[in-house]
Amino acid sequence: MNYLLVWFNELSNRRTSFGGVPNPITDMQILAWSALTGNQIRPEEATAIFTMDLAFRTAMAPKGDPNE
């Protein structure tokens, strides 16, 4: 499963952001990446990447003011 982390990192390194917050990796980005790299991605692999992406974005989300 290490290849999924490599794939996630390749996709994540090309993601856009808004206001310093990373945007989700989209289906279209995965399809384009797959076409460009020749990596054939199965639905369950895409689901795993979306799960990693959600965890990544959650960890990167701005935190509230600790003084509140």
Image (cartoon, rainbow, N blue to C red):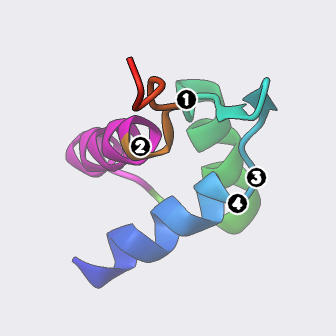
Q: Amino acid at mark 1?
A: Pro
Q: Are marks 2 and 1 in contact (CB under 8 Å)?
A: yes
Q: Position of residue 65 (x, y in %)?
A: 48, 25
User: Callout 4: few (<14), some (14-19), or many (20+) C-alpha neighbours within 10 Å?
Assistant: few
The structure residue drawn at horizontal position 57% and vertical position 41%, both measured from the top left corner, is 30
Q: Which residue is mark 4?
A: 13
User: Callout 2: few (<14), some (14-19), or many (20+) C-alpha neighbours within 10 Å?
Assistant: many
Labelled disc at residue 14: 3
Q: Which residue is mark 2?
A: 53
User: Separation of disc 3 and disc 2 at Cα?
Assistant: 13 Å
Q: Amino acid at mark 3?
A: Arg
Q: Are marks 3 and 2 in contact (CB under 8 Å)?
A: no
Secondary-structure class at tag 3: loop
Q: Which residue is mark 1?
A: 24
Secondary-structure class at tag 1: loop
User: Separation of disc 2 and disc 1 at Cα?
Assistant: 7 Å
Which stretch is magenta?
41-58
Q: Which residue is the extreme one toward the front?
A: 67
Secondary-structure class at tag 4: loop
Secondary-structure class at tag 2: helix
Residue 29 versus residue 37 in the image, above or below? above
